[in-house]
Amino acid sequence: MLQIRCKNNNVTKSFLEGTSLLEVYQDFAEELNMPYPVVSAKVNNTSQGLKFRLFQNRDVEFMDATTGSGHRVYVRSLSFVLYKAATDVFPGCKLFIEHTLSRGYYCNLKLRGSEPLPQDGIDSIRQRMAEIVRMDMPFRRFEATTEEALRVFRERGFADKVKLIESSGQIYTDYYMLGDTVDYYYGPLVPSAGYLQVWDIEPCFDGLLLRVPDQNNPTQLAPKIEQPKTFGMFAEKVRWDIIMRLSNAGDVNKAILSGYASELIQVSEALQEKKIVQIAEEIDKRFHDPDKPIRLVLVTGPSSSGKTTFCKRLSVQLLACGLRPMIFSTDDYFVNRVDTPKLPSGEYDFDNVSAVDAELLDDHLTRLLAGERVEVPTYNFVTGKREYNGRRLKLQNDCVLIIEGIHALNPVLTQRVEESMKFKIYVSALTSVSLDDHNWIPTQDNRLLRRIIRDYNKGAFTAQQTIGQWHNVCEAEEKWILPFQETADAMFNSALNIEFAVLRTHAEIILASVPRNCPEYSEAHRLLKFIHFFIPVDDKEIPPTSIMREFVGGSSFKYK
């Protein structure tokens, strides 16, 4: 008999060897009384599907779709249902699940022969999805030798999956079947389609939007938000992928194996510099507008998006335009630590906009833009106090003021500055490539890897600590940063197509240090699993001005 400890209630029970997680849950279900349906579980802090069978004593924690792990399982399974429905309705079509958008997932559907999607096409796919869910069609998992899996994918014309698996170096490969439809996913799925009761699809730009449950309340759809500018930024990323001839991890790996890593880095950096030049030229043009000249550039973005290096590179290009940039951070306007708002846990909430002295910042900006000389503060992060050290600023006629910080686009910080004087920039590390056509890499994973590496290299936090804080970081971004991204005049993608190959060389040993017996191990294991799909590349050819240098070290820019 096995001893299985349920971490949801810390009760241990005995089960026969080979008992599935679903059977274990059914035994615990009544006493757990979980508010939402369980969709997966963690076994010894590693995510598993409910069909997973137990043959040794284990700790088990059951997950619903309110958890990050459970939500990923739900969305992954729903993606397979969408793919099967699309190919059932339009045989031979290609589905590309590209990125998150409007709190759902933007998908591109290409019909065989480049035919246009019929007017009722999305309705037909929706009806087939509903039918699959109603039938409670089971997801079947197969573990095969990589050679056998490659044969299966080649027979079905899955070039993206063939390239991924060929270059990943795995001995065995899992794949799934839903009815007679085959697909590959790098994480577990729910047992059957009947688990997927909350979803929808609808037209979105030139594709479709897969709508998914709200993670806070998975009984209803995540509320849709309009994001035309964000879509434009993603569309620009796709154009860059076409230029680079890289659409997935397999393409990156094959290019690296063919000796093109250096060229990929150079072209990626050139494309980013080209975008920064375009933004600088637009600022210069509007700076010299005789009617409504801009004087204030506001730069924001979520954690580890590369805002600081972006500002420094933008400053170089503004100098080349004949302007004199003056940068300072909203961090210097933090209130004294004793006055910082707190989270319900009692910890300081540094991401809250109230952690910034908005009134003082707004006053200083107004006076600077009026031509006054102003003594600005410097925040001492050791003492937790704002200090004045004689740093006095005055804007000259050819000066443009650049304000960088997570709240820079929040209008509460610049209430007294006329809108016509502001130029707003949103910086984000969009996922550089997908694993394959149906396995995207969330932008949050890109930024989390960056932050883990930077925190570790600085000696600020261990990987375990950074992962432990990440949920609160993302919640704060949803509340304080993302609502303002569509107000930006320009958006900048700070990710490189070859980024994960470079990050792997730094992240592997750091992630491997996370103890298996802590909750953060689950996330460390997941991150390790997906970066292992990328062939590692040394960072020696990453230029010293690259945004990546902000995280892996070796930047020629000076940081606080």
Image: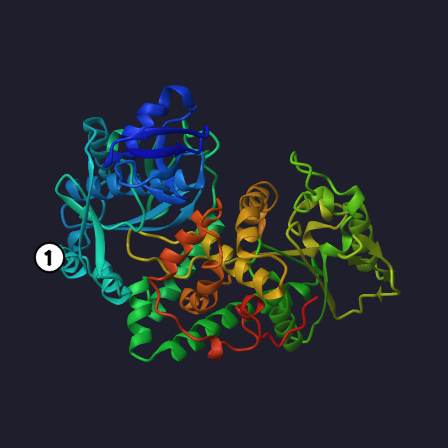
Helix, strand or loop status at disc 1: helix
> Where in the figure is residue 7, as x and y percent of width and height?
44, 33
Q: Is residue 74 above or below residue 324?
A: above
> Where in the figure is residue 419, as x and y percent of width and height?
69, 50
Direction from residue 354 to residue 200 in the image, left or right: left
Crowdedness near tag 1: few (<14), some (14–19) or many (≥20) residues, C-alpha within 10 Å:
few
Q: Is residue 505 above or below residue 15?
A: below
Direction from residue 467 to residue 256 in the image, left or right: left
Q: Which residue is the site of mark 1?
A: 155
Quadrant of residue 198 within the rendered picture: top left
Quadrant of residue 103 within the rendered picture: top left
Q: Quadrant of the N terminus?
A: top left
Q: Amino acid at mark 1?
A: Glu
Residue 204 can be seen, yes or no: no
Query: Residue at (32%, 24%) from the top-left corner?
Result: 27
> Where in the figure is residue 71, as x and y percent of width and height?
40, 39
> Where in the figure is residue 424, as x and y percent of width and height?
62, 55
Quadrant of residue 294 within the rendered picture: bottom right
Q: How is the image coloured?
A: rainbow
Say which of 67 and 9 sits in front. Answer: 9
Say which of 302 and 366 sits in front. Answer: 302
Query: Residue at (82%, 49%) from the top-left corner?
Result: 360
Say which of 15 and 331 sits in front. Answer: 15
Residue 422 can be seen, yes or no: yes
